């Protein structure tokens, strides 16, 4: 199926940080994460170890980018950092100043995306409760 390739391409296009420091990308420094993702998918396809990915509503990174679920744990963390590192760095206690690369990747993989309409009121999510909001774009007012 071509869907995993399309999902992988979308994920790579959405990398917020195109270049990460070598200490964050692991032992294959010098090889772009996008190439590593394509090689991994090719290897998985050739070995037929994975069924077609399910389409889900985007909440977690894995739901927004199903390709993450079929990657190796190390490559999954690297991709999660590519997708979220810029945003984690905007919050001091989630930044690389205080957290290791592994800690940031684990947090990234647990993040949930939420979309709000203009003027919408929000205090807590009915299922997940309260938490930290990091805005990709837009603004919020508090009262």
Image: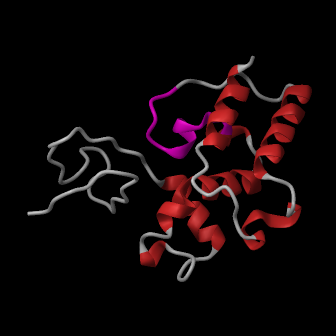
Q: Residue at x 32, y 50 (%)?
A: 128
Above or below, 80 against 57 in this view is below
Is 6 displayed left or right of 92 in the figure?
Answer: right
Q: How is the image coloured?
A: secondary structure
Above or below, 139 against 100 in this view is above
The outermost residue toward the top is 1
Q: Position of residue 132 (x, y in %)?
A: 33, 63
Q: Residue at x 44, y 69 (%)?
A: 90
Residue 116 falls within the magenta-colored stretch:
no
Above or below, 23 against 48 in this view is below
Q: Position of residue 117 (x, y in %)?
A: 23, 38
Question: As rendered, which of 69 and 113 lies closer to the eye?
Answer: 113
Q: Position of residue 89 (x, y in %)?
A: 50, 70
Give the number of callouts.
Answer: 0
Quadrant where the image shows the N terminus: top right
Q: Place residue 62 in its image quadrant.
A: top right
Q: Residue at x 18, y 49 (%)?
A: 122
Q: Position of residue 103 (x, y in %)?
A: 59, 70
Q: Which residues are magenta?
A: 56-67
Quadrant where the image shows the C terminus: bottom left
Residue 59 falls within the magenta-colored stretch:
yes
């Amino acid at each position: 199926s071509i869907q995993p390739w399309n999902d992988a391409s979308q994920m790579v296009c959405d990398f917020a940080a195109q270049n990460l420091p070598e200490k964050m990308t692991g032992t294959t420094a010098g090889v772009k994460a996008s190439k590593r993702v394509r090689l991994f998918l090719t290897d998985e396809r050739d070995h037929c170890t994975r069924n077609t990915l399910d389409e889900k509503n985007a909440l977690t990174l894995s739901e927004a980018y199903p390709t993450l679920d079929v990657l190796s744990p190390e490559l999954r963390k690297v991709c999660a950092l590519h997708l979220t590192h810029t945003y984690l760095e905007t919050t001091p206690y989630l930044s690389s100043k205080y957290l290791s690369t592994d800690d940031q990747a684990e947090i990234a993989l647990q993040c949930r995306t939420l979309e709000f309409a203009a003027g919408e009121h929000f205090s807590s999510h009915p299922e997940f409760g309260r938490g930290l909001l990091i805005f990709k774009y837009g603004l919020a007012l508090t009262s």
